[in-house]
Image: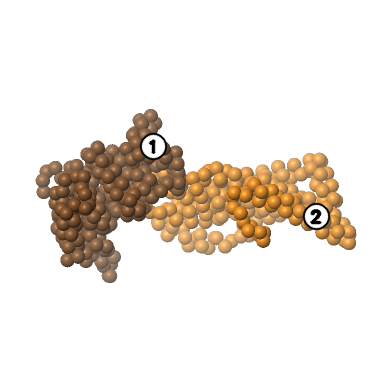
Amino acid sequence: MSGDDRVVVDGVSKRYGGEDAVQALDGVEFGVDDGEFVCVVGPSGCGKTTLFRIIGGLESATAGEVRLSGTPVTEPSPDLGIVFQEYHLFPWRRVRENVAFGLEQQDVGAEAREERVDAMLDLVGLGDAADSYPTALSGGMKQRVGIARALAVDPEILLMDEPFGSVDAQTRSMLHEELLSIWRETGKTVLFVTHDVDEAVTLADRIVVMGADPGHVREIVDVGLDRPRDRTDEAFAEQVAYVRGLISE
Amino acid sequence: MSTSLEPDFGTEFGGDLDRRRLLLGAGGVLGFLLVWAVAARFNPPYVLPSPGAVAAVFLAELRSGAMAAALLASVTHWLPGTVVGTALGIALGVTMAYSDLADDLATPIVRVLRPVPPLALIGFAIAWIGLNHTGAAFIIAAGAFWINYYAAYGGVDGVPDEFLDVAKSLGVDTDLGLIRNVVLPAALPEIITGIRTGIGRCWMLIIAAELMGVPGVGRELYTASQNLSVDAVLAYILLMSLVYLVLDTGVGAVQNRVLAWQ
């Protein structure tokens, strides 16, 4: 693996339970370069979410380890911003206060904090909703807050678990464009878990295709299409078909 | 909750509906007073005094300062008892629901102590503390304690783990930080409901607490019953209800304010 790997997943295995033990992951191995956009796809039950939780430090691996910029992950850290499928915004905090949460933990001064929050809300186009409570927002808006909240503390890596799985198709393709432009603007490394092959081919530089029982890496696909990508393009359709083929093998 | 036979027109007609309910409510009260007044005509005053007689006693007790004195005496043990019991109940509930270790350690004791009614503690209150405000406050605190313990436990138990995951990923790395930043605000609706229920329940408990001879509204009620002055009994019951109404409305307003995000 090259020296500028931002994320290294090094032989990660996960086994659950005692007697009726289930092997969720078996020797998962791949790397993510600095500034790269990598998607992890696979059928349900391939351990994508387990892998996501291990990379995020929310769960520990039974064997192997995950390293961020060379440091093994043992617990969640602000170097890695997590975006969840179900948003998990804090309902008792206004949008602005949700985005400010991580900054409050770092004792950033009030003025600098407000500035940063405003910049993040601008980035995701939510300036007008700053003083709303999350219950008043649509799914797409909630996830924009989720992204702004994760980015506010300026993590090196953005780790996303099916972040657009709960929004309608139209909102989803809008969010794809927004995420790509945020990615270009901030230069973050993005690791994006999804079961949607179209989504992965739309977004990723490389796609880690996983197989199930137990979860393992089948192949790492270089997407190699220029951006912006056109879903009606033949090359796009070929890539999608290729990845689908890998999954259903 | 609508018990009327008319369909509920929702908030659009809220103003009209409120006025209608107010009128009907006033009608209900009037009807009740009327039935009471008629019944009082056929009974001697030591069995059922008329509404007017009760109102007269109420005003007399109010003017003489007896009511204010009793109220002040009751508040002297009700307030500290409620505050201490509430705080301790929330503290234990939060600790046990958050920490598996605390839960495993304390659950058997909680299971045994929980069914003991606060009234059964009167013996302890007398033996340990004595027939005074502190003894009464002890009983009231016991009442507040369990209500708030259960409310806080349930609230904290229901906080989604994902909120904790989010907080950890944003740099919260201590238990105290998680409790302060996530667990307490997330469980606040249940905790406040517990506080509200506890405040009302403890106000009713003063009757029991004052059974052992501590002065207060409850004591006045006993004295009046022993003298067979049903009018005074009713006047003090009315006082208790009015105080409860004011308390509950006040706490309800605070609740709505604090939980505006809901």
Check disc 2 and give the amino acid type.
Answer: Leu
The one nearer the camera, A126 or A118, is A126
Q: In terms of secondary structure, where does tag 2 sit?
A: helix
Residue depicted at x 89% and y 61%: B42
Residue closest to the far bottom: A20
Is residue A199 visible in this depiction of the protein? yes
Marker count (numbered): 2
Residue depicted at x 35% and y 44%: A144
Marks 1 and 2, Cα distance to the nearest angstrom?
Answer: 58 Å
Residue depicted at x 54% and y 60%: B113
Residue A241 % position (x, y): 18, 59
Check disc 1 and give the amino acid type.
Answer: Gly
From the image, tell me which residue sits under label 2.
Answer: B33
Residue B15 % position (x, y): 64, 47
The one nearer the camera, B125 or A26, is A26
Q: In terms of secondary structure, where does tag 1 sit?
A: helix
Residue closest to the far top: A111
Residue depicted at x 87% and y 57%: B45
Q: Is residue B121 left or right of residue B240?
A: left
Q: Colour of chain B?
A: orange
From the image, tell me which residue sits under label 1.
Answer: A127
Answer yes or no: are tags 1 and 2 on the same subunit.
no
Q: Is residue B161 above or below residue B66?
A: below
Is the residue marked by circle 2 packed among few (<14), some (14-19), or many (20+) residues within 10 Å? some
Residue A84 % position (x, y): 33, 51
Name the chain letter of the residue that bears numbered label 1: A
Task: Tell me the quarter of the picture where residue A78 sits.
Answer: top left
The one nearer the camera, B121 or B128, is B121
Name the chain letter of the residue that bears numbered label 2: B
Q: Colour of chain A?
A: brown
